[in-house]
Image (cartoon, grey):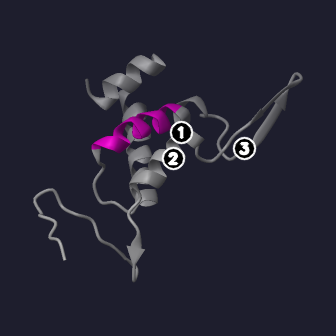
């Protein structure tokens, strides 16, 4: 099942253009935070979760908290479950460059 189909079933939304945009934005955010050029399999669930959170937060962009009718809600930038995966998959930058192993490269021992 593709990410778009999964997100569609999670949200019940039939607007594929909107869902595709949310998935694309989530992927771009994950790549920027991990210093990667390609999304690895381990980050795919985080991508869907981030897109789902973005869908659920539509209309509340830019808010850090909200109070309506005695109900208070606060929003975090990156939920802890996504943040932990991002931290585990992050590539360190050395001298301003992130060295990412390509799929067809062999890692050589020193």
Label 2, label 1: how far apart the Cα atoms are: 6 Å
Foreground: 30 or 67?
Answer: 30
Foreground: 4 or 17?
Answer: 4
Tell me the residue that label 1 is attached to. 81
Q: Secondary structure at mark 3?
A: loop
Q: From the viewer's perspective, is 91 left or right of 81?
A: left
Mark 3 touches mark 1? (CB < 8 Å): no
Q: Is residue 24 above or below residue 107?
A: above
The residue at the far front in this view is 110
Tell me the residue that label 2 is attached to. 84
Label 2 environment density (alpha carbons within 10 Å; few <14, some 14–19, many ≥20): few
Tell me the residue that label 3 is attached to. 63
Instruction: Give the percent coordinates (x, y) of residue 40.
Output: 29, 48
Instruction: Give the percent coordinates (x, y) of residue 110.
Output: 19, 77
Q: Secondary structure at mark 2?
A: helix
Residue 24 among those drawn in magenta: no
Is any atom of residue 59 visible in this view?
yes
Label 3, label 2: how far apart the Cα atoms are: 23 Å
Label 3, label 1: how far apart the Cα atoms are: 21 Å
Q: Secondary structure at mark 1?
A: helix
Q: Quadrant of the N terminus?
A: top left
Q: Is residue 32 above or below residue 85?
A: below
Magenta stretch prevailing secondary structure: helix
Query: Measuring 40% from the left and 26% from the top, which residue is drawn there?
Result: 7
Numbered range of the magenta stretch: 41-52
Mark 2 touches mark 1? (CB < 8 Å): yes
Is any atom of residue 15 visible in this view?
no
Query: Measuring 33% from the left and 29% from the top, which residue is drawn there?
Result: 4
Instruction: Give the percent coordinates (x, y) of residue 85.
Output: 45, 46
Of the residues under marks 3 and 1, which one precedes in the sequence?
3
Tell us which disc is closer to us: 3 or 1: 1
Query: Measuring 39% from the left and 53% from the top, which residue is drawn there?
Result: 89
């Amino acid at each position: 099942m593709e990410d778009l189909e999964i997100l569609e079933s999670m949200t019940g939304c039939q607007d594929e253009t909107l869902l595709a945009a949310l998935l694309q934005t989530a992927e771009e955010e994950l790549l920027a935070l991990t210093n990667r050029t390609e999304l690895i399999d381990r980050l795919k669930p985080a991508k869907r979760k981030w897109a789902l959170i973005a869908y659920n937060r539509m209309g509340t962009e830019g808010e850090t908290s909200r109070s309506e009718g005695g109900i208070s809600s606060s929003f975090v930038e990156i939920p802890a479950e996504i943040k932990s995966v991002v931290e585990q998959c992050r590539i360190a930058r050395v001298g301003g460059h992130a060295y990412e192993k390509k799929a067809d490269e062999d890692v050589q021992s020193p």
